[in-house]
Amino acid sequence: MRYLWITGLLLLAAVTAFTGVGTLQVSSPAFGNKGAIPAKYSCEGEEVSPPINVSGIPAGARSLALTMHDPYAPKKGGVTHWVVWNIDTGGAIPENFKGASQGFNSDNKTGYKGMCPPSGTHRYNFVVYALDTNLQLPGNATKAALESAIRGHILAQGELTGLYSKR
């Protein structure tokens, strides 16, 4: 068991060294990592995006990109709730953020889509990327299109996970 643990750490170190990607600290004043996301940000509330704070942004970053995804939703590939790019590198993404460039969520609509799980508690991963460029993507870009466009441009990334279940 100890051998597997050490092997895992060495593999993680090798992957991190190979990619050269740093780590961002992603947080929210509205909820903690692996904590409950308030209903305000869901289909049961105002359905506005939560505030997100990002620190540890590398000096060479030109923009940030963000995805919010529920990988365990009962739909093949999960459900994407938010796709945003060309966010300013200041580190504060305010509540109900409408700035930057926003792409299609899983409903093929632009912008933020609040959580609305059919049953149980779902996990929502907010992944933020610090990029060495500004992206030129169409307004209907999806999570997959964004992930393709950022390959080779990621200086650092970080993740915040929130939980939500309907009342």
Image (cartoon, rainbow, N blue to C red):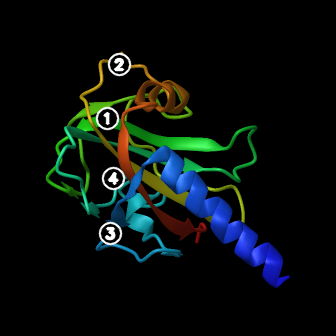
Residue corresponding to mark 1: 85
Residue corresponding to mark 2: 137
Residue corresponding to mark 3: 28
Label 1 to label 2, Cα distance in Å? 9 Å
Q: In percent of the image, x 30 and y 18: which residue is there?
A: 136
The x and y percentages for residue 120 are 71, 67
Total marks shown come to 4
16 horizontally vs 3: left or right: left
Mark 4 or mark 3: whose residue is earlier in sequence: 3
Q: In percent of the image, x 24 and y 28: which residue is there?
A: 134
How many residues crowd mark 4 within 10 Å: few (<14), some (14–19), many (20+)? some
The x and y percentages for residue 14 are 59, 56
Helix, strand or loop status at disc 2: loop
Helix, strand or loop status at disc 4: loop
Q: Quadrant of the N terminus?
A: bottom right
Mark 1 or mark 4: whose residue is earlier in sequence: 4
